[in-house]
Image (cartoon, rainbow, N blue to C red):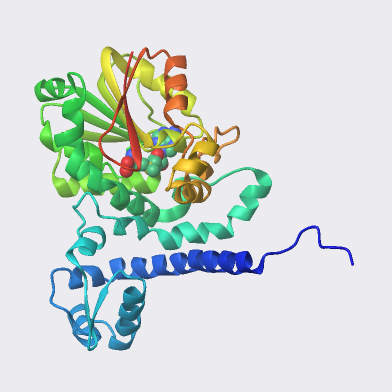
Amino acid sequence: MATDPHPVDMEKVKANAERILGFLGGAVVSGMIYLGDRLGLYQALQGSEPVTSGDLAHKTRLHERWVREWLQGQAAAGLVDYKGDGHFALSPETAIVLADENNLMFLAGGFCALPQQMAVLERLPESFKTGLGLPYDVLGPEGARGIERFLSPWFRTQLVPVALPKLDGVVAKMQTGASVADVGCGAGVALLEMAKTYPKSAFHGYDISTYALARAEENKTKAGVRNITFHDARRDGLPEGQGFDFITTFDCIHDMAHPDTVIRAIRRALKPDGTWLIADIHGKRTFEENLKDNPLAPLMYGFSVLCCMSSALSEPGGAGLGTLGFHEGVARAMTAEAGFSRFKPHDFDNPINAYYEVRP
Ligand SMILES: C[S@@+](CC[C@H](N)C(=O)[O-])C[C@H]1O[C@@H](n2cnc3c(N)ncnc32)[C@H](O)[C@@H]1O
């Protein structure tokens, strides 16, 4: 009898099935984290003594049976601790990540646009066929809010006290009165933090997302800050002429359909002694290195298909760099190509982002 040239190892099949079921579990638990965040369940648990599902339902004005099932799932996933006798608690360490909106380690915001991000799956088969992706605005206002909540903890806790002082001469200029632009400003949180701290400076935000710009205006009004102007970059892009002392781009160059055009516009808009601060995703230089040495690679390739590469392919001829595509090697090459001569990497202790101080 001929031997099978491709024998199947059933132990490996079982191990693979378990691993793949784990991904389904992760997706479903992510949905439960979304609910916990949206319904204020984590916040209700934060700092509290162990509670029963009845206590938590009473506190959050929800139905006990639903809260009990949710709590049991959270305990099974290791997110909430089961204390016995029907009592559950959120440890302070998990509360920081899931309930403390202003903590650098807060991550629940990253789940708040999950329904919209997953709904896009219905439209992506068409993108795989046509090659054309979808702009950020297909995610609706929730998409803009999701990015805002995911990325804001760094802006609120690190940008002004930790990052800006490390840049050559930038703080001194902003203290006396500088002209500053944030390109791809999203909901404007980075600008708000800087504008509140440096009232003598003038700040400008540019984006192409209607929802992000609306959110930015709302945030500005709420904060009562007057020294920021937001611009719809589709009609009112960066001005020609070397007017800006400082330009920032946070997690957006890789999302752009034509990053080379925007980088050249930034070069033209920056004063000869100006500074451009780039924050972009910590990608390795090759796919092989990401595969071997980037624990966030599965998440980033997934985000890429759902949002980032999709946005960067949403116009004909789009660059489609992908979430991990504007890594240091590409950033060095593209900025040099646009006429920048200085490039200094910074490590601001962020596992997601790399930072580059780029100057003419
Ligand atoms: C991941 S979000 C980051 C938003 C913001 N910088 C932050 O950190 O919260 C990327 C943003 O880039 C914007 N964007 C994409 N292409 C753009 C372009 N050509 N010009 C300006 N903004 C753009 C998107 O609309 C989106 O708001």
Residue sitting farthest toward the right:
1
**Figure quadrant of residue 10:** bottom right
Q: Residue at x 12, y 31 (%)?
A: 198
Q: Vertically, is 16 above or below 190? A: below
Quarter of the image where ligand 1 sits? top left
Q: Nearer the viewer, residue 14 or 37?
A: 14
Where in the figure is residue 12, as x and y percent of width and height? 61, 64
Q: Vertically, is 34 above or below 203? A: below
Q: Quadrant of the N terminus?
A: bottom right
Q: Vertically, is 2 above or below 246? A: below
Where in the figure is residue 218, as x and y percent of width and height? 24, 49
Q: Vertically, is 341 above or below 179? A: above
Examine the rendering and report whether any part of residue 37 can be seen: yes
Asked if residue 187 lies left or right of residue 196, the reply is right
Q: Residue at x 25, y 74 (%)?
A: 81
Q: Nearer the viewer, residue 180 or 248?
A: 248
Q: Quadrant of the C terminus?
A: top left
Where in the figure is residue 275, as x and y percent of width and height? 27, 20
Asked if residue 266 lies left or right of residue 312, the reply is left
Where in the figure is residue 170, as x and y percent of width and height? 18, 22
Examine the rendering and report whether any part of residue 240 can be seen: no
